[in-house]
Image (cartoon, grey):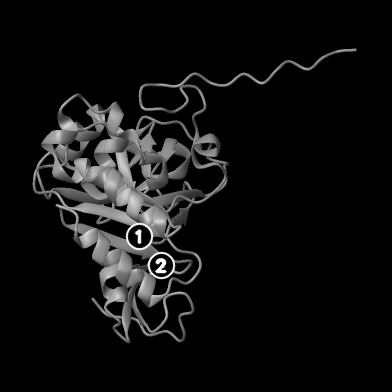
Amino acid sequence: MTVAPAHRTAPEDHHGGPRRLVGPLAALDGRLAGPHDLLLMQCPGSLRPVGGGELPQWARAVLRVHPWVTVGRAPAVLGGPADTPPPVRCTRDVGAAPEQWLPVTVRGAERGRRLDALAPRAAVARTLRPEQLVGREELLPPGRVAAVPALAALPAAGRLVVEHRLAWGPIGAVGYELGTGVPVAGPLSPLRLVLRAPQPVSRRDALLLRRALDRLPVPVQAELETRYGAVLLAEYAAGAPTLTLLTPEGPREVHDPWFPRGRQWRLP
């Protein structure tokens, strides 16, 4: 009887992920990338600025060293070779199906410098969801966590969220640093969290969690991610009758973020 060879697990790199399992299918696990996901681009020159034109020089310089981008909350764009430029320094079959372009943000080396762009899904080598960043403080250089209050407060914040039985993960500067190892968080950086809430959370539970997070020694900005978008935990806990639901199509005014009614869109 022939015995099938045992499945061999790919070796882990120093960021905690597989070395050889790359490409959009392995990287995205067959799903769509969601807001706050970190994407490692195997062809960063393929990015297109949302406003058109070429990538600015600063973005090219950053992506050459750290080819990580953050998925934004905007619709993905479909396009074929005829109406989207081919990725720079990447090959593409002109007879292939239309490419899917993901909304992403390039983080600059300078504070506050950002570039909104579109990234081809086929060029995604690896993805990290916020939930996968929990507990990665130990991968940072010694003393780094102690130097950044938001990083030091992360375990305590996680314990508070877990008490409310919510899946969670860090986002923003703290999430980016935990995922990429690039030291972008500073002494004044807030601790930003995404709390997965596919099922309704009571206002009372939200208020209790917000009060607990407010007692941490750093400002905490948390958002509840529902099936339809995200609302700020502080706004929901305050009991406001109308809430701003952040969706890929833009902010929307709703009364219940889990069961939004009508099409009340908030204009920018």
Q: Residue furthest right?
A: 1
Residue nearer the viewer, 204 or 70: 204
Whole-number angstrom distance, CA of label 2 to CA of label 1: 9 Å
Q: Label 1: how many residues lie within 10 Å, few (<14), some (14-19) or many (20+)? A: many
Q: Quadrant of the C terminus?
A: bottom left
**Mark 1, secondary structure of its residue:** loop
Residue type, numbered disc 1: Arg
Name the residue that disc number 1 marks.
73
Q: Residue at x 45, y 80 (%)?
A: 260
The mark lying in front, picked from 2 and 1, is: 2
Q: Is residue 67 visible?
A: no
In the rendering, which numbered label is found on residue 155?
none
Residue 91: name its quadrant.
top left
Residue 68: name its quadrant.
top left
Residue type, numbered disc 2: Gly
Name the residue that disc number 2 marks.
229
Q: Earlier in the sequence, mark 2 or mark 1?
A: 1
Q: Label 2: how many residues lie within 10 Å, few (<14), some (14-19) or many (20+)? A: many
Give yes or no for contact between labels 2 and 1 (Cβ–Cβ under 8 Å): yes
Q: Residue at x 57, y 21 (%)?
A: 9
Q: Position of residue 89 (x, y in %)?
A: 36, 29
Seen in the picture, residue 174 relative to 248 is either above or below; the reply is above
Q: Position of residue 161 (x, y in %)?
A: 36, 56
**Mark 2, secondary structure of its residue:** loop
Number of marks: 2
